């Protein structure tokens, strides 16, 4: 059984018309930033307590596409749905989180 919380269409229309809500998603923002500034730092993360590992927007988009393809190949029907909060805080977790939302754009 699926449970979905969605506001009424009229409320969505009003909020979008007022500029409060956008039709674009975080995934659109990440892919757009990758086009504009591909080498800028996208995700800073600590692998250990003091080892900073970061991904550029170009690398993040690559990971997102790879995870989204893997989910699609596994028959994951949840692609395109809003994911739960990522389990970890590493760069791979961020990419997996975005992949679930991406629906392969």
Image (spheres, rainbow, N blue to C red):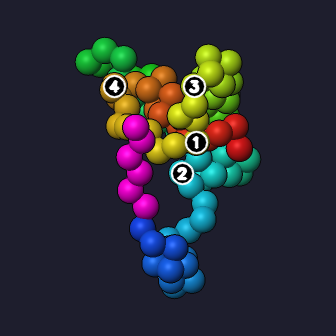
Of the image marks 4 and 3, the number of the one nearer the N terminus:
3
Label 4 Cα neighbours within 10 Å, binned few <14 / some 14-19 / many ≥20: few
Label disc, if present, on residue 26 of the rendered structure? 2
Q: Nearer the viewer, mark 4 or mark 3?
A: 3
What residue sits right under mark 3 in the picture?
76
Cα–Cα gap, marks 4 and 1: 20 Å
- Name which quarter of the figure residue 40 lies in: top right
Q: Which residue shows up at 58% across the image and 35% down it? A: 79
Label disc, if present, on residue 80 of the rendered structure? 1
Cα–Cα gap, marks 1 and 2: 12 Å
Is disc 3 placed on a helix, strand or loop? loop
Of the image marks 1 and 2, the number of the one nearer the N terminus:
2
What residue sits right under mark 4 in the picture?
88
Q: Which residue shows up at 66% across the image and 46% down it? A: 31
Q: Which residue shows up at 47% across the image and 45% down it? A: 82
**82, 2: nearer the viewer:** 2
Q: Nearer the viewer, mark 3 or mark 2?
A: 3
């Amino acid at each position: 059984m699926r449970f979905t919380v969605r506001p009424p269409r009229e409320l969505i229309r009003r909020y979008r018309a007022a500029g409060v809500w956008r039709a674009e998603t975080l995934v659109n923002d990440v892919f757009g930033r990758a086009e504009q500034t591909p080498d800028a730092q996208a995700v800073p993360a600590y692998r250990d307590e003091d080892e900073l590992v970061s991904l550029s927007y170009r690398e993040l988009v690559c990971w997102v596409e790879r995870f989204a393809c893997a989910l699609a190949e596994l028959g994951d029907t949840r692609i395109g749905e809003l994911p739960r909060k990522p389990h970890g805080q590493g760069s791979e977790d961020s990419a997996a989180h975005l992949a679930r939302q991406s629906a392969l754009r």
